[in-house]
Image (tube, rainbow, N blue to C red):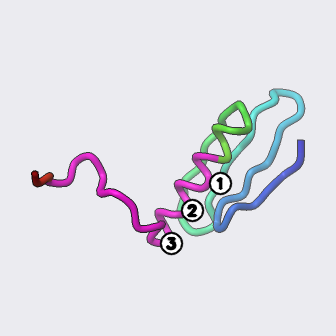
Amino acid sequence: MENLRIGVVDIVHDDQTTNDHLSCAVCTWRLGVSPREYALRLARRHDESHQGGPRRARPSGAARTG
């Protein structure tokens, strides 16, 4: 597998452990996860947290109306 960068997040693959190691160029966030699909999802989510993210539904802690 290859190493990737998603926004501010670097994803480095370790061939021995088959884990992807995620690190942020902006803050001290670091994480090691597997499989690759999970690593990509977490990397996108973390990058969005620095970019303001796409405008979607509010987090579950937000007040609801209706």
Where in the figure is residue 14, as x and y percent of width and height? 83, 37
Left or right relative to 60: residue 3: right
The residue singled out by tag 2 in the image is 47
Badge 1 amino acid: Ser
Residue at the farthest front position: 66
Left or right relative to 55: residue 38: right
Residue at the farthest left position: 66
The residue singled out by tag 1 in the image is 23
**Number of dots carrying numbers:** 3
Residue 51 bears which disc, if any? Answer: 3
Nearer to us of marks 2 and 1 is 2
Q: Look at 74% across and 51% down and name the residue there.
A: 11
The residue closer to the viewer here, 62 or 46, is 62
* Residues marked 2 and 3 touching at CB (< 8 Å): yes
Where in the figure is residue 13, as x and y percent of width and height? 82, 42
Start and end of the magenta stretch?
41-63
Q: Spatial distance from mark 2 to mark 3, Cα to Cα? A: 6 Å
Nearer to us of marks 3 and 1 is 3
Q: Secondary structure at mark 2?
A: helix
